[in-house]
Image (cartoon, grey):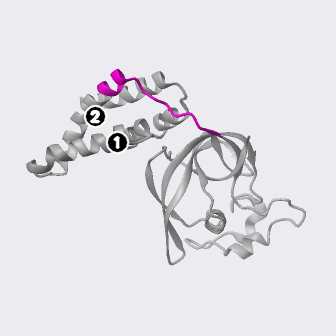
Amino acid sequence: MAEELPLFVLPMILLPGEVQHLRIFEPRYKQMLDDCLLDEKNFGLVLNDDFSKVNGWDSPRKYGCEAEILHHDTKGSNHFIEIIGKRRFEIDEIIEPSLPPFSDESMSDLIPEEGIFPDLESIIAKIPSESDNMKLYISAKVNFIEEEIEFSENKLDELENIFRKILAKIGVLLRLDEHVFDDWIETQISQIMYNNPYSAYTIAAMTVSDPETRYQMLECNEGQTLYDMLLEQLDVIEI
């Protein structure tokens, strides 16, 4: 059954188990953050599609990742949050935001000064009285993907061998003391590969930066395909 989820639409990907930090300054996302904190609910982080629009805003792509807020701080007019990726989801139905961007002609009287957005109250006052939706941000009805992708023992062994070599390179860059070097690698292997339901995505989060590649991993539901994609990325780094 589809559930309604607020969406943070950005040119980035959040993977299950991955920790990210976000700065929130746009009025629409400040409203979303207020709603999430007040109701103690999560939101979805979705890669934007700049070739498709929803009431003037970039549309979300089809697949996203649920985000849980771990920490929230306010500095001036900015909000800073620490989030962790949870369940993957597929968007079933997009719920349009109540207003278009400030660049829209209808919003001309609210064009922000350089670096300063209008206050939320002024923006919300622009929402037509007949509107059923008072939210400035995009939401969606989503179907969560509950199935965990698991690898066979042979595949895990192959991933571990390559990942060890990459961790060794990272350890050198971090200038780890030789007395703790091996223990550090073993701890990372244990925590990331064997005590983590999101092991494949955690490795991807550490080694893959390209948004499109990360998106392909996020939408993938086939263990063999995800394994091949991850192995290809690790092979490039190992070289």
| SS for dot 2 | helix
- Image height of 133 relative to 165, above or below: below
- Residue 94, image x and y in percent? 73, 45
Q: Which mark is residue 122?
A: none
The quarter of the displayed image where residue 132 is located:
bottom right
**Disc 1 + disc 2, Cβ < 8 Å:** yes
Asked if the stretch drawn in magenta spans residue 155, the answer is: yes
Which residue is at the front of the view, 126 or 190?
190
The answer to whether any part of residue 35 appears in the image is yes
- Of circles 1 and 2, the one toward us is 1
Q: Is residue 226 left or right of residue 178?
A: right
Which amino acid is tagged 2? Phe
The quarter of the displayed image where residue 28 is located:
bottom right
Q: Which mark is residue 192?
A: 1
x 49%, y 44%: residue: 16
| SS for dot 1 | helix
Asked if the stretch drawn in magenta spans residue 122, the answer is: no
Q: Is residue 68 left or right of residue 20?
A: right
Which amino acid is tagged 1? Ile
Q: Is residue 15 left or right of residue 120?
A: left
x 56%, y 44%: residue: 87
x 28%, y 44%: residue: 188
State the separation of the CA atoms marked 1 and 2: 10 Å
Residue to which mark 2 is pinned: 163
For this orientation, the residue located farthest to the bottom is 76
Q: Which residues are magenta?
A: 144-158
- Residue 222, image x and y in percent? 52, 24
x 69%, y 62%: residue: 102
Label 1 Cα neighbours within 10 Å, binned few <14 / some 14-19 / many ≥20: some
